[in-house]
Image (cartoon, grey):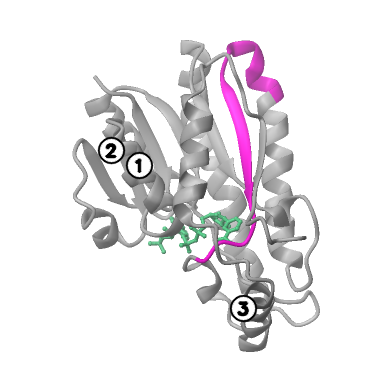
Amino acid sequence: MNKLVVITGASSGFGMSLAQQLSDAGYSLLLLARRLEKMEAMNLPNTMCRKVDVSDREAFENAVREAEDIYGKTDLIVNNAGVMLLGNMEDQNPSEWNNMLDVNLKGVMNGMQIVMKDMKERRSGTIINISSTAGIRPYGNHAAYCATKYGVVGMTEVVREELSPFNVRVLYVCPGAVKTELLDHTTRQDIKDGYVNWRDSNDVNTISSDDVAKTIKFAYEMPQGVSLREIVITDTRQDQ
Ligand code: NDP
């Protein structure tokens, strides 16, 4: 049986590109996001799609167990689902902080905890958490988003140390700016405009979701005993 890969946030952007590439390579997939129709429209073979909010621990676990009953234990989970609600600390509505904390941090914690016990027992498996360059350096109007992405780096490092004696790989990927739906959810139009202006004036427009997905796939397909622990991938023209 083909190995099972779980991808969160598979209804657009990096997650969707990765789902397509891993399916083309023959893996079985569990795709999770809230927009079920977008995932089902890909019509991938050996793929289960479930409408799951990653902050809902029970629904997340139920979907993983359901897929494992059919395809076998999870060999890779990519904790990719995320939201970016840019704003400054002074004005931002705390409901936006809560949303990012729930999805970007607790969603990743849920994903790791749901699969790690089995991976430890089997002495095999890979967890890939998607952070950001905003997880390793600050950007204006990114305070709460940076908090979540620095958090992803911190917890990934800790869990990597905890699982390395068990031959389980835990790594994080920090992409730079890539055009996806991510910016659409920011509510402050002036901040969105500033972001687009920065991206266009520096011509940070070459890198695509497919490039990020290809990198994740490469890291996964290295032998189990080889861990690309930290990956930073940006457009060549991105200078920050
Ligand atoms: P998209 O907005 O295109 O994709 C985000 C995905 O996350 C969607 O599939 C969305 O699906 C899903 N998602 C959001 N909230 C939830 C939730 N509560 N439960 C389940 N799924 C959810 O953005 P990207 O592909 O760009 O982002 C993917 C990851 O990469 C994110 O973690 C992001 O922070 C990170 N990143 C992106 C960068 C970029 O410039 N694009 C740069 C650095 C990091 P749905 O709405 O259907 O639930």
Marks 1 and 2 in Cβ contact (< 8 Å): yes
- Mark 3 surroundings within 10 Å by alpha-carbon count, few (fewer than 14), some (14 through 19), many (20 or more): some
Amino acid found under the numbered disc labelled 2: Asp
- Who's the residue at 43% across and 53% down the image? 9
Whether residue 175 appears in magenta in the rendering, the answer is yes
Q: Report the span colored magenta.
A: 161-179
Is 54 situated left or right of 150 in this image? left
Amino acid found under the numbered disc labelled 1: Gln
Residue at which label 1 appears: 21
Gap between marks 3 and 2 measured at Cα: 33 Å
Instruction: Using the image as rendered, state which of residue 72 and residue 236 is in the foreground.
Output: 236
- Mark 2 surroundings within 10 Å by alpha-carbon count, few (fewer than 14), some (14 through 19), many (20 or more): few
Amino acid found under the numbered disc labelled 3: Val
> Mark 3 or 2 closer to N-term?
2
Marks 1 and 3 in Cβ contact (< 8 Å): no
Residue at which label 2 appears: 24
- Who's the residue at 64% across and 72% down the image? 199
Whether residue 154 appears in magenta in the rendering, the answer is no
Looking at the rendered structure, the secondary structure element under dot 1 is: helix
x and y, in percent, of residue 123 in the image: 51, 11
- Mark 1 surroundings within 10 Å by alpha-carbon count, few (fewer than 14), some (14 through 19), many (20 or more): some
Residue at which label 3 appears: 196
Marks 3 and 2 in Cβ contact (< 8 Å): no
Q: Please determine whether, in this image, residue 211 is positioned above or below residue 186.
A: above
Gap between marks 1 and 3 measured at Cα: 28 Å
